Amino acid sequence: MNACKPARFPVSLADIEGARERIRDGIYLSPCPDSIPLSEVAGCRLWCKLDYLQRTGSFKERGARNALMLLPAEQRQRGVICASAGNHALGLAYHGGLLGIPVTVVMPRTAPLVKVATCRRLCARVVLEGDSFAAAKAAAERIGAEEGMAYISPYDHPDVVAGQGTMGLEILEQVPDLEAVVLPVGGAGLIAGVATAIKSRRPEIFVAGVEPERCASFAAALAAGQPVDCDSRVTLADGLAVPRVGLGPFQMARELVDKVVAVSEDDLSLAVLRILELEKGVVEGAGAAPLAALIAGKLPELAGRRVVVALCGGNIDPGILTRVVERGLVADGRMCRLSVLISDRPGGLADLTSIIAAAGANIKEIVHERVFASSDVSAVRVVCTIETRDRAHLAEVHQALETHRLPATVVEAT
């Protein structure tokens, strides 16, 4: 094990290079292939850094292993504790097991079940506390102080940031002529480390960050000039739902990041769907955020340029994945729920279904609403969930219904 001293903020290129040598034998060198189909939908020449292929499904292993390997011998015996929505906890649990270091993880009770189960399978002690990351963090700090465990932040820790920065060194080697890199932003540990690695060697490369609209903590920090609590709501990108970015990472990243944008829940769902369909990969909302920004046109300055997106988290609950895919289909105009008032007499429903079928759409579900349909007792409201090819095809279905005097209104998404 490399016995170099732990890093301190601000983390330097030398710290990141040292971290790479230190963790090299325990971290998968994830591929960074180009993607023709994703390039077409993103409007640029796209490479995907597939860090969701790490053993525990995310880039968090990099920082976790580096921080664990730099612990003093006495602290390795007492163990470590962290607060995490899942991925940092998984990384610590896995590498703590490999290195013989006891790990306790504190998660919000709202953490994805797959991450809770996997942490326990990796023999970590799991404590579920509170309904937010802030509550879990407070509990972790309290338990750590009581039991003498070192608290390892998922992002506001220099050794963690140095470890995350190793991804940047790999990207530079795998795509030597890249012009831009797009990264997800939660607590800012990843973007601080990767931006430091890339800008230190290639300052002309454009670095962009992407966060969810429902928890835009980096943008809030930029506006205030320092980390502040932001309005945080439940988001598909649960791994990025950090209401206050880390102070150390923010101070590093604000000088290096060229642009930060926010994406909607529909943007995230559509990006998950695109990766699933076009690259046969399964990523969580946080991991899909960089692609979401490109698809949504949030980074027009990158059109036609050589861009790397970090797809760095794949731990999505299978049950949630189904709903996300359906939401993505809705955002893509390929699934819609229509409300139509038809005659409640023989042939009324047959007329409706024949019109939809003639337009080439597929009916997934039909529900009748008689009692609340209309003051006309001879009419019934029918809610149809239909599948279409795209938005243009959906417009054709609407037009066909209008032509037959059966105007339809769109009701809630799937």
Image (cartoon, grey):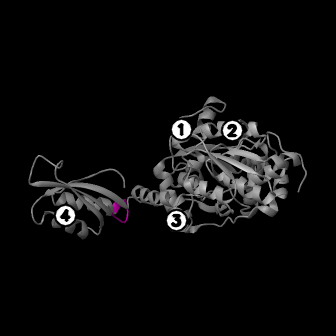
The amino acid sitting under disc 1 is: Ser
Q: CA distance from mark 2 to mark 1?
A: 15 Å
Q: Which residue is mark 2?
A: 246
Magenta stretch: residue 391 in it?
A: yes
Q: Which residues are magenta?
A: 387-392
In which quadrant will I find the N terminus? bottom right
Residue extending farthest right: 3
Q: Are marks 3 and 1 in contact (CB under 8 Å)?
A: no
Q: CA distance from mark 3 to mark 1?
A: 27 Å
Residue 147 higher or lower than 89, as above or below: above
Q: Nearer the viewer, residue 228 or 408?
A: 228
Foreground mark, 3 or 1, reads: 1
Q: Is residue 266 visible?
A: yes
The tag on residue 276 is: 3
Q: Residues within 10 Å of mark 2 (few under 14, many from 20)?
A: many
Residue 66 coordinates in the image, percent (x, y): 79, 52
Q: Which residue is mark 4?
A: 352
Q: Which residue is mark 1?
A: 232
Q: CA distance from mark 3 to mark 4?
A: 33 Å
Q: Are marks 3 and 4 in contact (CB under 8 Å)?
A: no
